[in-house]
Amino acid sequence: DLLQEVKLPLINTEYLLTVIAQEELIRTNLTCRDLLDEAKVYIFKKANLLTTKSPMGPKIIPRKTAAGVLLCVGGRGATGDPFKSVECYDLRHDRWFYISEMTTRRRHVGVCAVNGRVYAIGGHDGNVHLNSAEVFDPQTNRWEPLAPMNTWRRGIAVGCLGGPLYAVGGLDDSTCFDTVERFDIEHNTWSTVASMSTARGGVAVAALKVRHQIYKFDYEDTRI
């Protein structure tokens, strides 16, 4: 009952996640965990990661200004082992904290944020290349699986043009790809579109909504 009177979303992010969230009495109480989840959702709301509007209770007071967040998704350690962990950097408080892990370990993964959700596509799990994809929803603080791509690959770039996602290029152990696949978010389906003129691994893309075009930037083509 006491915790319900505390405005958890306004507490320092690091203290909330490293001290309060680790308290045994809170971790073992369903109501307390729900209150913590509500606070975590607000962290993303004030950071502009969520674009959809939802009713706000008295515990959540809108701010006049909001800083952004930076997400570090997957990757690998010094030994090359892939991570499924995800770290979030709160620009407002200059703090890093962990959010929910992906369902699959991924290095050289393609990542893109669309409509307040974060998409992780392809990569390598330490054993095989991946064609799987998943999406993180800050509203639920969970990753959910999506339909897989047609091509297993790492080092891909992912861009968005106001709706569908585009998975561009990439490579496996023997081939760089010129392949481009388009993901229909609404219908959870992949389709192949026109290939690039050059095969590219470790490619990056940038989308310009004004002209509805995607530009690529790469550091590797047919070299493996």
Image: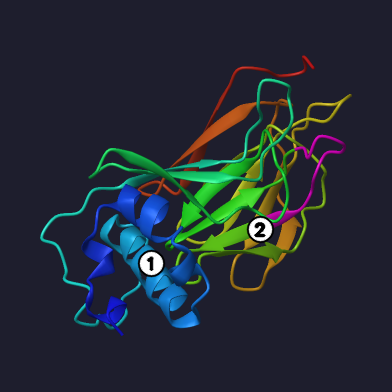
Say the numbered circle drawn on residue 163: none
Q: Does the magenta stretch include residue 132?
A: yes
Give the residue displayed 70% in from the left and 56% down from the top.
Answer: 103
Identify the residue shown where x is 70% and y is 35%.
169
Check the image and report above or below for 21 versus 154. below
Query: Main SS type for the magenta part?
Result: loop
Mark 1, other Cα within 10 Å: few <14 / some 14–19 / many ≥20: some
Residues 62 and 14: in front is 14
Quick check: 207 above or below 185?
A: above
Query: Which residue is tagged 1?
Result: 41
**Residue for badge 2:** 134
Residue 46: quarter of image: bottom left
Q: In which quarter of the image is the N terminus?
A: bottom left
The three-letter code of the residue at mark 1 reads Val
On the rendered structure, is 46 left or right of 82? left
Front residue (pair 3, 94): 3
Snapshot quadrant of residue 84: top right
Q: Is mark 1 on a helix, strand or loop?
A: helix
Where residue 162 sits: x, y (%)? 45, 58
Three-letter code for the amino acid on which mark 2 is drawn: Glu
Residue 36, image x, y percentages: 40, 69
Q: Earlier in the sequence, mark 2 or mark 1?
A: 1
The relative height of residue 11 versus residue 87 in the rendered view (above or below) is below
Examine the rendering and report whether any part of residue 160 can be seen. no
Instruction: Give the extent of the magenta segment.
Output: 124-133
Q: Position of residue 120 (x, y in %)?
A: 62, 50
Q: How is the image coloured?
A: rainbow
